[in-house]
Image (cartoon, rainbow, N blue to C red):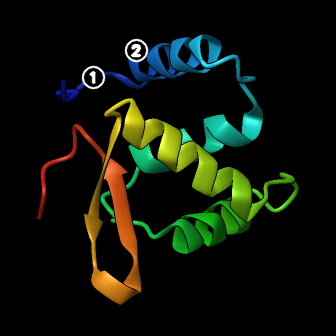
Amino acid sequence: MLIENVEYDVLLERFKKILRQGGLKYTKQREVLLKTLYHSDTHYTPESLYMEIKQAEPDLNVGIATVYRTLNLLEEAEMVTSISFGSAGKKYELANKPHH
């Protein structure tokens, strides 16, 4: 079930529901990650997404492990899609974004 052109608020509510169902906490770090993906046309590696968040929100205490875990959670929930680049790893984008 892919998401098609949903508003951010709807996407955020779905994300919160997925976190609750998994017994996970909704955190500012996870929200910023989702918002960064939403407002960008970039295909991110976990590392590039981490660096983007650190640059945009230097006071936010976010770790690379949080980025990996959250991306995996979002991918399992079909909220993000990934493209494998072999040894270069995966790149992620929101599922509702058209591929370039």
In the rendered image, residue 12, in percent from the top left (x then y), is placed at 50, 22
Which residue is situated farthest in the bottom direction here? 87
The relative height of residue 77 versus residue 97 in the rendered view (above or below) is above
The relative height of residue 83 versus residue 24 in the rendered view (above or below) is below
Residue at figure coordinates x 63%, y 65% from the top left: 50
In the rendered image, residue 81, in percent from the top left (x then y), is placed at 28, 49
Please identify the quadrant where the N terminus is shown: top left
Residue 75 located left or right of residue 27: left
Q: How crowded is mark 1: few (under 14 residues within 10 Å), some or many (20 or more)?
A: few
Asked if the residue at tag 2 contacts the one at tag 1, i.e. Cβ–Cβ closer than 8 Å, the answer is: yes
Please identify the quadrant where the C terminus is shown: bottom left
Q: At numbered mark 2, what does the secondary structure look like: helix, strand or loop? A: helix
Q: How crowded is mark 2: few (under 14 residues within 10 Å), some or many (20 or more)?
A: few
Residue at figure coordinates x 70%, y 51% from the top left: 66
Task: Name the residue nearer the viewer: 45 or 6.
Answer: 45
The relative height of residue 78 versus residue 22 in the rendered view (above or below) is below
In the rendered image, residue 78, in percent from the top left (x then y), is placed at 31, 34
Residue at figure coordinates x 70%, y 16% from the top left: 23
State the mark number for residue 60.
none
Q: What residue type is labelled 1?
A: Val
Q: Which amino acid does label 2 sit on?
A: Val
In the rendered image, residue 75, in percent from the top left (x then y), is placed at 39, 42
Residue 86 located left or right of residue 97: right
Residue corresponding to mark 2: 10
Task: Name the residue nearer the viewer: 5 or 79.
Answer: 79
Residue corresponding to mark 1: 6
CA distance for labels 1 and 2: 6 Å
The relative height of residue 44 versus residue 96 in the rendered view (above or below) is below
